[in-house]
Amino acid sequence: GEDVEQSLFLSVREGDSSVINCTYTDSSSTYLYWYKQEPGAGLQLLTYIFSNMDMKQDQRLTVLLNKKDKHLSLRIADTQTGDSAIYFCAERRNNDMRFGAGTRLTVKP
Amino acid sequence: KAGVTQTPRYLIKTRGQQVTLSCSPISGHRSVSWYQQTPGQGLQFLFEYFSETQRNKGNFPGRFSGRQFSNSRSEMNVSTLELGDSALYLCASSLVTGSSEAFFGQGTRLTVV
């Protein structure tokens, strides 16, 4: 089973903000990631954050990291229908990455 | 700059056969990792290669093996296929082991019948 946990589903209205949450277990993880997967496709790297940072912003995406609680979140501002996909949180431990089960984001018009 | 290329995209094999999947990383990247994605188990790490050496291995049986060539291209092989090996196999490319950025290919969808 995964050591990285995410809620499985999130539904928002177009134009609203989406917040996808994740908890991880290894405090020694160096990097934490958010990937997006659309149907039939591979994983697209959206953003990542180094473990000694607590926030990173990249256009519509904001990543927040609470290292004490081992909690990571991804906020998507002004969510669009094209943002509908599965979002995976991942932690890098040594030479491998551990993924959550993915959160399916549905954006309703 | 070309992305990560995995071939073939789709494959159908029968139980007991073996299969070889290929991954060409981004030019200049020397680390290649392989993952198996299934609906039941999610994304699971198989192994990582860097400079033609396996650096780390996940919890998979010995039927799963891989190698990396001097041009950083990697292959993974699955012998004596089982129905449960049906999955999307994804390859990730990084500059070096433990790099901040890991880019994935489109994957190879393997179906075992």
Image (cartoon, coloured by chain):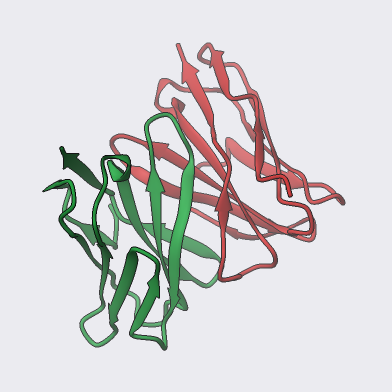
Q: Nearer the viewer, residue A107 or B61?
A: A107
Residue B95's spot in the image, x, y percent?
Answer: 69, 64
Q: Nearer the viewer, residue A50 or A56?
A: A56
Residue B46's spot in the image, x, y percent?
Answer: 53, 48
Residue positioned 41% across, 39% down in the render = B37
- Relative to B92, does residue A97 appear above or below in the rendering? below
In the rendered structure, the answer to whether residue A67 lies left or right of residue B89 reads left
In the rendered structure, the answer to whether residue B103 lies left or right of residue A32 reads right
Q: Nearer the viewer, residue B85 or A10?
A: A10
Q: Is residue B59 visible?
A: no
Residue positioned 43% across, 29% down in the render = A40
Q: Quadrant of residue A56?
A: bottom left
In the rendered structure, the answer to whether residue B18 lies left or right of residue A12 reads right
- Relative to A91, does residue A102 appear above or below in the rendering? above
Residue positioned 39% across, 42% down in the render = A37
- Relative to A42, does residue A92 appear above or below in the rendering? below
Chain B palette colour: red
Residue A105's spot in the image, x, y percent?
Answer: 22, 45
State how many labels appear: 0
Q: Which quadrant holds the C terminus of chain A?
A: top left
Q: Quadrant of residue A55?
A: bottom left
In the rendered structure, the answer to whether residue A11 lies left or right of residue A27 reads left
- Relative to B38, does residue B103 appear above or below in the rendering? below
Q: Is residue B82 visible?
A: yes
Q: Which chain is green?
A: A
Residue A34's spot in the image, x, y percent?
Answer: 38, 60
Residue positioned 47% across, 40% down in the render = B36
